[in-house]
Image (cartoon, helix red, strand yellow):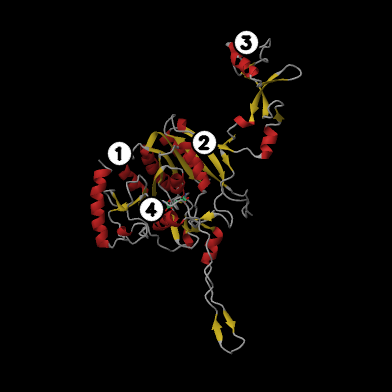
């Protein structure tokens, strides 16, 4: 979990995309193939206005996940102390910032699309009200409470703060939904499915076959000479109960009470609830990370993507940071659009696409200055310099290489802010100002023809 530097203690200047360009037209400055995947360097408000002109995107995005600044009034730096982004909007300014953008996201979202907004306790309630207003209270699905870090020695006079929140809304009642399950643990299996069927060895539990409430239909009538208990009805019609019994799936107690057997081997697992304890962010020396502050747990993103989209769908994160959503979407065979305003974010995303992540330990060791030590040669009175220590082999995880995407920036892009992935495509050598202008012109006309038609 990253903590920002208070604004008063920071006197840097952050490099961000100069996207006050009124035309809001983004051009590819690097591209590979005809991929739907796009990474935008710019303010998401202008990028989204540009995307709304694109028929292949407007109303086609199945899932939006955002993890915007949280109104902390501070500045965030990478593990290597590079300024990453500022989070200085607070109060009404923050709400206006979010409202403008959420309205555009709603327009970009497909009718069966969903949006997840990740926040902490500062603004989650303000934004919940905003989301109710924009997406409709009826489309509120869940407010997920996530454990973000391990318990810590909290110095304030309050309980340790280890949670943050994800607001989940759908655009309409018919959103894509794939129920998510966790696997049963041995301990839980023994507790939940304590019985073994003698004939088959199948582990199962025995559950009542009645439910609260009376009914006038067949489920309220007699079955096998028995009425449902007072104030209750049978959960199934008598025909269905007969069928269960024929298949040996009804357990009759010594007193003649029927119960239905529910088998472990037919269970999909434990349905995921709205408290998530297993998706802590970078939390130990072996966690794989890009070193970007506030980088989210990629497994958490995968859960969200699996729940609310299908293979081939379009997923957008317009506060992309280190690109966690984009990598997760790509690994799950979704198409993606990423947007970020910061050049450090672009650097980190491009590096992540090409080189994967490192363990936190490697990041820390990488940061330590490599001091030259000296040793005394016992057989001469000369001091000789010891050889430069051999560079430590960093345990980079070669994540699935993502090469099929375009990177787009606005017309004023100068080509100096970050390192484009030149080694993947040498003919797209990092553009100097002149070559870049020509390339942009050429690409813009190509894009107008292929994308905006
Ligand atoms: C909390 S970080 C996102 C971290 C990300 N979820 C990850 O896993 O790495 C917020 C990001 O929003 C970006 N951002 C802030 N304002 C933006 C804007 N107006 N347009 C685009 N990106 C913006 C910042 O540069 C920063 O990278």
Q: Is mark 4 within 8 Å of ligand 1?
A: yes
Q: Which circle's residue, 3 or 1, is located before the other in the chain?
A: 1
Name the residue beneath numbered marker 2.
142
Q: Tell me: is circle 1 under 8 Å from ligand 1.
A: no
Q: Residue furthest right?
A: 254
Q: Residue beneath label 4, please?
A: 341
Residue 27: x, y in percent? 29, 51
Q: Earlier along the polypeptide chain: callout 4 or callout 1?
A: 1
**Chain-order first, disc 2 or disc 3:** 2
Disc 3: CA contacts within 10 A as few (<14), some (14-19) or many (>=20): some
Mark 3 / mark 4, whichever is N-terminal: 3
Q: Which mark is residue 55?
A: 1
Residue 229: x percent and y percent?
68, 15
Real-space CA distance between mark 3 and mark 4, rounded to the nearest whole angstrom: 65 Å
Q: Which residue is mark 3?
A: 221
Element on which disc 2 rests = strand
Front tag of 4 and 1: 1
Question: If you read the primary sequence from the N terminus, does the residue marked by circle 2 or circle 1 appear first?
Answer: 1
Label 4 CA crowd tier, 10 Å (few <14, some 14–19, many 20+): many
What residue is shown at x 30% (from left), y 58% (from top)? 427
User: Dot 3 lies on which element?
Assistant: loop
Is residue 213 in view from this perspective?
A: no
Pointer 2 with pointer 3, Cβ within 8 A: no
Looking at the image, the residue that sits furthest to the front is 199
Mark sitting earlier along the chain (2/4): 2
Q: Nearer the viewer, residue 414 or 104?
A: 414
Element marked by disc 4: loop
C-alpha separation, residue under disc 2 versus residue under disc 3: 38 Å
């Amino acid at each position: 979990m990253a903590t920002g530097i208070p604004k008063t203690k920071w006197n840097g200047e952050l490099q961000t995309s100069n996207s006050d360009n009124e035309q809001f037209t983004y051009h590819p400055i690097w591209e590979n193939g005809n991929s739907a995947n796009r990474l935008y360097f710019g303010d998401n408000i202008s990028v989204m206005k540009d995307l709304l002109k694109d028929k292949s995107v407007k109303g086609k995005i199945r899932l939006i996940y955002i993890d915007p600044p949280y109104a902390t009034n501070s500045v965030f730096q990478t593990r290597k102390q590079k300024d990453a982004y500022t989070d200085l909007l607070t109060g009404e300014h923050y709400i206006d910032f979010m409202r403008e953008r959420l309205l555009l996201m709603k327009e970009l979202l497909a009718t069966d699309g969903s949006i997840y907004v990740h926040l902490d306790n500062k603004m989650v309630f303000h934004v919940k009200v905003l989301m109710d207003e924009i997406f409709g209270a009826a489309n509120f699905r869940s407010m997920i409470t996530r454990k973000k870090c391990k318990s810590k020695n909290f110095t304030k006079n309050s309980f340790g703060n280890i949670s943050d929140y994800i607001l989940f809304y759908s655009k309409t009642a018919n959103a894509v939904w794939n129920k998510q399950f966790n696997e049963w643990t041995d301990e839980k299996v023994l507790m939940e499915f304590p019985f073994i069927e003698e004939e088959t060895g199948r582990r199962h539990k025995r559950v009542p076959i009645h439910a609260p409430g009376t009914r006038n239909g067949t489920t309220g009538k007699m079955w096998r000479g028995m009425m449902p208990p007072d104030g209750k009805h049978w959960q199934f019609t008598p025909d269905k109960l007969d069928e269960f019994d024929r298949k040996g799936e009804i357990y009759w107690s010594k007193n003649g009470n029927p119960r239905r057997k529910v088998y472990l081997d037919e269970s999909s697992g434990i349905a995921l609830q709205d408290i998530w304890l297993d998706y802590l962010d970078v939390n130990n020396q072996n966690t794989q990370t890009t070193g970007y502050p506030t980088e989210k747990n990629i497994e958490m993103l995968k859960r969200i993507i699996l729940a609310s989209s299908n293979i081939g769908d379009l997923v957008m994160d317009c506060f992309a940071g280190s690109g966690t959503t984009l990598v997760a979407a790509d690994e799950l065979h979704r198409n993606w659009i990423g947007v970020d305003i910061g050049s450090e974010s672009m650097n980190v995303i491009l590096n992540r696409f090409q080189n994967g992540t490192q363990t936190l330990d490697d990041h820390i060791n990488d940061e330590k200055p490599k001091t030259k030590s000296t040793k005394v040669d016992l057989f001469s009175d000369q001091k000789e310099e010891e050889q430069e220590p051999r560079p430590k082999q960093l345990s980079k995880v070669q994540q699935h290489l993502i090469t099929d995407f375009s990177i787009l920036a606005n017309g004023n892009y100068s080509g100096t802010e970050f390192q484009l992935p030149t080694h993947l495509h040498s003919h797209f050598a990092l553009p100097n100002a002149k070559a870049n202008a020509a390339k942009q012109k050429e690409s813009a006309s190509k894009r107008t023809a292929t994308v905006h038609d």
